[in-house]
Amino acid sequence: MKLLQVNYGRALAKDDDEQAARLMQSAIKIAGVRGLLWKIWIYDDEERMAGGIYLFDSEENARNWGDEVLEKSLKLHPGISDITKRYSDIDGDLTRITRGPVAAAPE
C-alpha cells in the first residue's frame, strides 16, 4: 500500500456552489482511479487550503495518479495554487489498532 497526501491553496470556500459541483464531478471520477482504495477530502476555509489523503493498493498506482494526472486535474479548477504531494508507507498493524481504515487492504 502507498499513502499519498496532497495539500493545495484554494481561493474559493467550500460553500461556493460552482466549485462544489466541480468537486462532486471530480469525486465521481476519482472513485474510479486504478488502485485507489479510498480518499479522504480535507479543507480549512479559514486558511484557504484543501487537499486529500489517498490510499492506493501499490506505489505504482499511487505515482501514476499523483505524478501523471493529479496536478493537471487540479490546475483545471479555478483558484487552486501551491500544490504539494507526499508519498508515504503505512504501518498496517499499528493503524488497524487505532482503527485506521485499512482492514480490507492487503499488506
Image: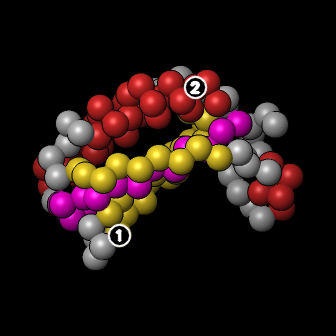
Task: Report if residue 77 lies within the magenta region.
Answer: no
Inspect the image, locate mark 1, and give the three-letter code of the amino acid beneath it: Asp
In the image, taking residue 22 as reference, residue 59 lies left or right, namely right
Q: CA distance from mark 1 to mark 2?
A: 28 Å
Which segment is the magenta one?
A: 1-14
Q: Quadrant of residue 94?
A: bottom right
Query: Is residue 10 shown in magenta?
Result: yes
The quarter of the picture where the C terminus appears is top right
When the figure is inspected, residue 43 is found, relative to residue 17, above or below; the finding is below
Residue at the image point whose x is 54% and y is 30% from the top: 63
Identify the residue shown where x is 67% and y is 29%: 58
Residue 6 place in picture, x, y as percent: 45, 49
Q: Which residue is mark 2?
A: 61
Any part of residue 31 in sight = no
Residue beneath label 1, please? 44
Q: Count all numbered tags in the image, as a single digit.
A: 2
Label 2 element class: helix
Prevalent SS, magenta region: strand
Contact? badges 1 and 2 (CB < 8 Å): no
The residue lying toward the viewer, choosing from 44 and 31, is 44
Q: Residues within 10 Å of mark 1 (few under 14, many from 20)?
A: few
From the image, which quarter does the N terminus lie in?
Answer: top right
Q: Nearer the viewer, residue 34 or 47?
A: 47
**Residue type at tag 2:** Asn
Q: Secondary structure at mark 1?
A: strand
Q: Dot 2, crowdedness within 10 Å: few (<14), some or many (≥20)?
A: some
